[in-house]
Amino acid sequence: MSSGKRLGFKFNQRNVKDRTRFSGETDQSPISFSDDNETITRVERSIGDDFPSVRVVGDTAIPCSTLQLQKETTCGCSCWWDFKIQKNHGFIEIGIIGTSATGDRVYFLKPTKKEVQYEENGDYKTQPYGDDIFEEGDNIRVIFKVSSNSAGGSLSFEKNGKSFGTAFGEIPLIDGHPFYPMVGLNDQGDSISIV
C-alpha cells in the first residue's frame, strides 16, 4: 500500500470540462452529481453525445503540486486518493489536471486499455501501463509524489491494493498552477465515486 497523506476532496460542480459537440447548445449538465458530490454519473443529452469524455475536476489542489509549494517542504510530499468504478462502458479517465499559460495539462490512466496518456493543447502521448484492466467494482488509488530534490512530480496507480508502478515521472511543476484530481466520463451511465 502507498504511504503519504490522503487527499480529501469532492467533485466540483463548477469545474466540469465539457468538450463534446453539444457543450454550448444546452444548459443541461452532462454530469449528474450525487452522494454529497462524491459520485458522478455521465448523462447523455442527445444520441451521439459521447466522445470526447467530459472531465470533472476535484475541489482541492494537490499539495506540493507547484514549484512554490514544493520549495516550502524539505522532506518531499506524497498524497493519495481513491476512486471506485461504479459503471464503465469502456472509456473513462482517472488522473490529474493542471493549467499552464498554454492550456490544460492532463495526466491520466485509461483503465480499460492498459495505457496511460498525457495531453496538452490537443497533443496526446500514450504509452502502455500495467498488466491488467480495471473493471466495475475495482478501487483505484491515485498517488502523487514529489521528492525533496526534484522539480517534478510522479504519478502512479494501484488497483485493489496492487501497485502498477510509476506511470509518469518528472511531471513539470509550475508556480501558480497546481494540479487537481480529475475523472473523465464518456458514455451514458458511466459512474465513479470517491471512496
Image (cartoon, rainbow, N blue to C red):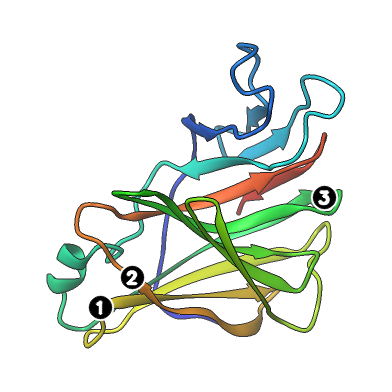
The residue at which mark 3 appears reads as 88
The residue at which mark 2 appears reads as 172
- Residue 149: percent from left, percent from top: 22, 88
3D distance between C-alphas at marks 1 and 3: 35 Å
Q: Nearer the viewer, mark 3 or mark 2?
A: 2
Q: Is residue 99 above or below residue 64?
A: above
Residue at left offset 54%, top offset 51%: 122
For label 1, the SS is: loop
167 or 9, which is in the foreground? Answer: 167
Q: Earlier in the sequence, mark 2 or mark 1?
A: 1
Query: At label 2, which amino acid type do we have?
Result: Pro
Q: Quadrant of residue 128?
A: bottom right
Q: Earlier in the sequence, mark 3 or mark 2?
A: 3
For label 3, the SS is: loop
- Residue 113: percent from left, percent from top: 79, 68
The residue at which mark 1 appears reads as 151
Residue at left offset 59%, top offset 32%: 18
- Residue 127: percent from left, percent from top: 65, 76
